[in-house]
Amino acid sequence: MEKMTVRMGEWFFTQALAGYKKILESHGVKVETVPDGIIIEKRHLELLPEAFFAYYLKQYSVASREERIIRGLHKKWKEGNSSVKTELNRRINDIKKKTEKYFSKTKEGARLIELAESYRKEKKYSEETDQWIDQFLELLKTEEIDHKLTANFFKTVHLNPYFGQVSFLNVSKNSLSLEEQKETFYKDFVLPVLEEWEFYEALEKGDRDEVLNIVGKSANSLSSLKRPFRKKTLEEMKAYIEREVHKCSFTDFPIALHSFDEGIFVPLALSIGNAINMTWDSNGKELLPLCSLARLLIFCSQAGATMSQGKSVFVYYGGTFDEIYQTNQFYARIKSENRTFDEIVFDLVREQKLRADYTKNHYMIYEYTSDYQSKRTLLNYMVMTPSLVRLFSDHANLFEKIHHTNKSGMVRLLLQGIDPKHFITEVLRGKVKNSYPSFEVVQMTIIRHLNQIYAKGDFEVDSNLEKRYVWALVKSAEQVKHKIGNDKKAQGIAYRLLNAVRSNDKNTFMDTVMRTYISCDLEIPGILLEALHENKLDFATVGNAWIAGLISKANERNGGEDLNE
């Protein structure tokens, strides 16, 4: 076999295909795709170990990362901020210790260690320390030093949570040279694929001697067939494969000699000992079967995700493989610009808006992190439904007027399909308590109201009219506040109403509001009756909007709302 088409499947396997393509293409190798997957070529597999390490060494270079951080801290120290010297010393000492472990006897390593000691002992800035830092960072860029420290870093921080300590990820392999680790990767992951391909090709050609030769010399998964094949004819071998060997669960390859256990993909894998009922035929031996190629591809999965605040993020939807790949490449690019999660979501919407029928897709955003040692995975999956795409696309201006911490929380709740009404109420409670302006709460209330409408599939609604309903409540409450003329009294009423909204107590809310209008000699607006009837607005929308108006500050909207934005 020279090539094989592998199609998308579960989200994490699609992420694996994206990672494989990303690793090879970052190495200058073009990976051919089909609408629903990629084509794996034998010649590319031979290049994979080199491409794999080149990708991770560039992506997570210790020298590049530490230069940015250390130069920034040194600049602050130079400008008189002595408090950063502790962190500077800690980072430099950490690098020094790692260098001592592997390079204390080399010329570059010894000099780096010497500079680290001199810099750490210096308590006051001098021009000489500029030279020390420059030399220290230049020595850290020495290929041998940078590659060694970077390899240990990406294996421990980025690959260990995904795959545990298999193959060259085992701590015992840290002392190996880079070339030796590449050889280990080839032997443990690439060679089994090539052997399985040769084995299947020989079996299909009817070459019994070649089949026995491949099985006999294999030290990998095929070695399990040595004993069963010893005295069998070619036809008996084929019958054994058909009867006793599973097919791969992820590819079209007909032979699967691995199980989907913890060493394959930690975030979703299971320990056989703790999942007997989930093993194949409940035999207590085999979980989901997979071939060596699927195992290799999954080992590339980390590269297919984007790292964000210590978590892996992958965007998945019902598009072609190329579309999904480009979407995640776009996500990775904008994430590298240090944008917040909510900013990235809106950028994704704008980017997807350029594509046809973008509002017909459900975009799944998987965000997860694993701890191999504690066997613990935290996985969030957020769904950007067509209704949310419409909300984020058509009403981005509403989100722009919300403080970034509240905006991020609001976006996450919407993506998780959680009603943000309690979140809005708590934000509003903070405004009441601290006498802060409530304008952003009005924006959040409008967002929630529009989301409820779009979620019902009503995309033709007059959004300006719906905004006016909310603003009518806000302005009516502002009139009440003006009549009360006492912020403390308005605050006390707001607290009672917040409790009623939180507990969904419509009667108490309406009783309090009606008494307030009567005492102020004001006419109760008909829109307030929505708190009871909920024909146009639900109770939480009415309650939060009215309370926000009751505690609003003069001129906080710069003259009023703009319904056309």
Image (cartoon, rainbow, N blue to C red):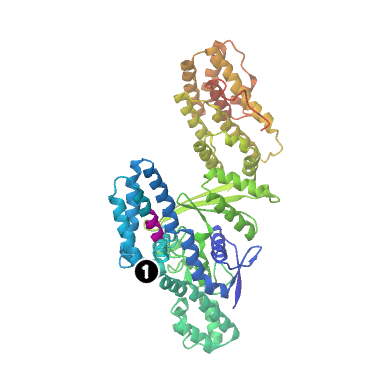
Our reading of the magenta stretch's main secondary structure is: helix
Q: Is residue 273 left or right of residue 449?
A: left
Residue type at numbered disc 1: Lys
Q: Is residue 498 magenta?
A: no
Name the spot of residue 282 as percent of width and height, x first.
46, 66
Per the rendered image, the range of residues in magenta is 133-140
Above or below, comparing residue 389 to residue 28 in the picture: above
Q: Residue at x 32, y 54 (%)?
A: 93
Split into 4 quadrants, where in the image is the C terminus?
top right
Mark yes or no: residue 98 visible: no
The image quadrant where one finds the N terminus is bottom right
For mark 1, does the 10 Å Cα neighbourhood hold few (<14), some (14 to 19), or many (20 or more) residues?
A: some
Q: Mark 1 — residue?
A: 173
Tell me what residue is drawn at x 47 percent, y 20 percent.
Answer: 491
Which residue reaches farthest front? Answer: 127
Say left or right for 315 vs 222.
Answer: right
In the foreground, 236 or 63? 63
Residue 456 higher or lower than 480, as above or below: below
Q: Out of 394 and 295, give the one closest to the viewer.
A: 394
